[in-house]
Image: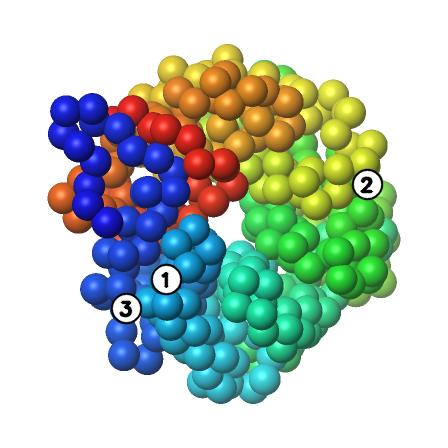
Amino acid sequence: MSKSNSTDRSTTTHELLVRSADAALGFQRDDGSFPAPQYGVDQELPTPVRTTAHWLLTLTEAYQITAEDRFCDAAADAVSYLLKDELRPSGFTFHARDAPGKDSCDGLVGQAAPIRALARASTVLDRPELAAVAREIVHLHPFDERLGLWKPVEIDGTTLSFDRTLNHQLIFAASIATLADDDSEIARLLRRFLTMLPSTMRLHDDGLIKHYIRPNPTDALRTVVRSPSHWRLLLNEVVFHYYSRSAERRRTEIGYHPVNLSSLATLRRAVPNHTIWNREVIQQALEFSQANSKLYLSGTESHGGSAMPGTNIALALRVLGDKDLDDVLEFLESDIRRKYDEDSGLLTTTDSDSTFQAAAVFLLSHFPNITIQL
């Protein structure tokens, strides 16, 4: 696909998805994988699982838009990679990272992307066995009914303590939501997760979502008494107050606020009639993004968190705030104008981790085919 005419300097969301997918064919490896992200720190080396899953989402979308076999074939190759035995060496969760002293599954977030991608590919490629694999991995993860939280599972099948990072819980929930229509148990777990969310998702006074979960202290204590291995839940109660006053933590929370809102928007589409959507906590979180719109529109990369903050907020305002497309377009355009490289057809400018950012183009599939002014 040729790039947009330089005189009108516009494109569409579908054109961006297809052009990025077309460019990605040039660096898809022989085994179907795509280059791993570069965000690892402290000797942490991500595997290609997450970026391959994200590109699989884009390839399936490009195939739906164009019906071109090259995108279908590339998507099938990416699926073949994700189904390799070596990626689930013990038959449990995906090997998402190599990090001394840390789990190899990368908590919940390391499993979310391949679950979502396999579920989507199952529908688009008409391969029901892929959804079966995705459901299998979801059901490996124990869910605590009292706290409304999932526990990660290591690649050898060991159940770990709760993933205390809120955006990880939300991303996991949003990813498995694609399977809820055909799995009553997943649908039930999502409803319970949302019911308990006002107890686990805490906000600053201005509506900024806090980084760590904070379950009801009594429930947390009962959980630790029953299973002492979850002692970090009590530690979490102590550091929660410290981090609530930390300027550095607040910068992190500002960066992840769009990620949290985007996941909530995805969950509302999957579970539209839950009472959580009428709760003040959702409205307060939305109001923070609007009150700080200049920050997100300017794309302050140093805050980290979201690779596409404007796109995340546009989705949240559209779904959670019931805004028209015209009311959220400036957020969507802000990402594209700053990050889209017309020469390569990829979202590779401005961010230090261009590999991860480019793969995030799949987020545009949440929107209809609308015109973007470059």
Q: Nearer the viewer, mark 1 or mark 3?
A: 1
The residue where tag 1 is placed is: 68
Circle 2 SS class: helix
The residue where tag 2 is placed is: 195
> Is 150 left or right of 340, judged from the image as shown?
right
- Farthest front residue in view: 67
Quadrant occupied by the C terminus: top left
Cα separation, mark 2 vs mark 1, equals: 42 Å
Cα separation, mark 1 vs mark 3, equals: 17 Å
The residue where tag 3 is placed is: 28
Q: Nearer the viewer, mark 3 or mark 2?
A: 3
- Whether residue 323 is visible here, answered yes or no, is yes
- Whether residue 352 is visible here, answered yes or no, is no
Estimate the x, y position of residue 48 in percent, counting from the top left: 36, 68
Q: Nearer the viewer, mark 2 or mark 1?
A: 1
> Is 320 left or right of 301, judged from the image as shown?
right
The residue that appears at 51% across and 23% down in the rendered structure is 325
Q: Nearer the viewer, residue 107 or 3?
A: 3
Relative to residue 282, is residue 294 depicted above or below? Answer: above
> Is 59 left or right of 89, judged from the image as shown?
left
> Is 205 left or right of 148, judged from the image as shown?
left
Estimate the x, y position of residue 360 in percent, counting from the top left: 39, 48
Q: Nearer the viewer, residue 334 or 22?
A: 22
Looking at the image, how many numbered discs can be counted on the residues? Answer: 3
State the mark number for residue 35.
none
